[in-house]
Image (cartoon, rainbow, N blue to C red):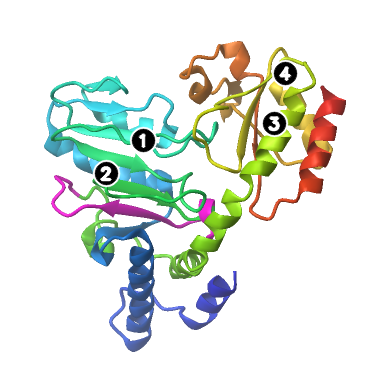
Amino acid sequence: MEAVRRTMIEDWANPTSTHREGQRARFRIEEARREIAVSLGAAPGELVFCASATEALHLLIRGLQPAQGDRSAAVFAGEHSACLNPLRDWSRVTWLPEIPADCATVVQMAASNETGILYAMPSALDAVRIQDCAQAWGKVPVDLSDCDAAVFSGHKMGGPRGVALLWMRPGLPWDPVMEGPQERRRRGGTEDLPAILGLAAAVRHLTERQAANASLAPLRDAFETEITSWNRDIEVIGQGVSRLPNTSCILFRGRNGEALHASLDMAGFAVSTGSACHSGSVKPSHAITTIGYSLDDARSVLRFSMLPDAQSSEVEALAAAIKRLT
């Protein structure tokens, strides 16, 4: 917050301008790019600043499509719509773990934003491997060695909203789809310098943030043990597999997830449903149904995300509220 405030006051110029103030803003951006690249183990020139992970995924996937011809893409069926939507332009799309012999691109999220389940990148010869790291960054270590491109969200790891990263390995068959001289002609539009420098400031605390999130796993596990001990047909989705340490995706079988969400909100707990609003109607989450649950189950899911400074007393109060409301 302090980095954003200071930048809005001191570095107000357009980074594309050639005057002294503009060039000072340009220097600040490139300084931030170098700092963030070091934390990711990437080269500064491989990073593109975007306004959101959604934008970054669209730029990446739409930019790859022309060079891939009629070759297929393989994607995790539980991916975020920000990834699935641009794949509609592709002539053929298959669902992982199926990978066709002529596969051109593989897209896999590192961590599910709804279940918290962690996923490994599938191996695929001669395919561009894209990793959606939006939910994983800042919670678990991210390794770029097994992918060719990746997307990161700023606000998911303690940075401000309105900034994200697109990383691409040099030599990818990618064409820009957003005209403009900014970001080495890879993404048009004036860079949001306050948001970018806010992101760089957050990255300086990335190690501490990951450690704080890792320490939440015992607290999360205790919460899950408590609420599943009541014999009320409550199930932890993803229990027993690798998950983000701060996330609990809970199925309250036979109960209305929207109603429970509203009741917990009134009780002072900001939780999430496993569904998304679309055109004014609530649709069951595809992220839940694609891993084997029914539509009715998907309507009964809530996600609980603990902040890095969550206290045991807060989690105990949450469990007590759930017990009272279910």
In percent of the image, x 36 and y 27: which residue is there? 76
Instruction: Pinpoint residue 58: horizontal percent, then vertical percent.
Output: 33, 42
In percent of the image, x 52 and y 49: which residue is there? 139
> Considering the image in quadrants, where does the N terminus appear?
bottom right
Is residue 229 rendered magenta in the image?
no
SS type, badge 1: loop
Label 2 to label 4, Cα distance in Å?
Answer: 40 Å
Instruction: Pinpoint residue 176: horizontal percent, then vertical percent.
Output: 21, 50
Q: Which residue is mark 2?
A: 146
- Neighbor class of circle 2 (other Cα within 10 Å; few <14, some 14-19, many 20+) is few
The amino acid pointed to by label 2 is: Asp
SS type, badge 4: loop
Q: Which residue is mark 4?
A: 256
N-term-proximal mark, 4 vs 1? 1
**Label 1 close to label 2 by CB (< 8 Å):** yes
Label 2 to label 3, Cα distance in Å?
Answer: 32 Å
Q: Which residue is mark 1?
A: 120
In percent of the image, x 19 and y 21: which residue is there? 100
Q: Quadrant of residue 170?
A: bottom left
The amino acid pointed to by label 4 is: Asn
Label 3 to label 1, Cα distance in Å?
Answer: 25 Å
Q: Main secondary structure of the magenta part?
A: loop
Q: Which residues are magenta?
A: 156-175
SS type, badge 3: helix
Q: Which residue is mark 3?
A: 224
The amino acid pointed to by label 1 is: Ala
Q: Is residue 60 above or below residue 202?
A: above
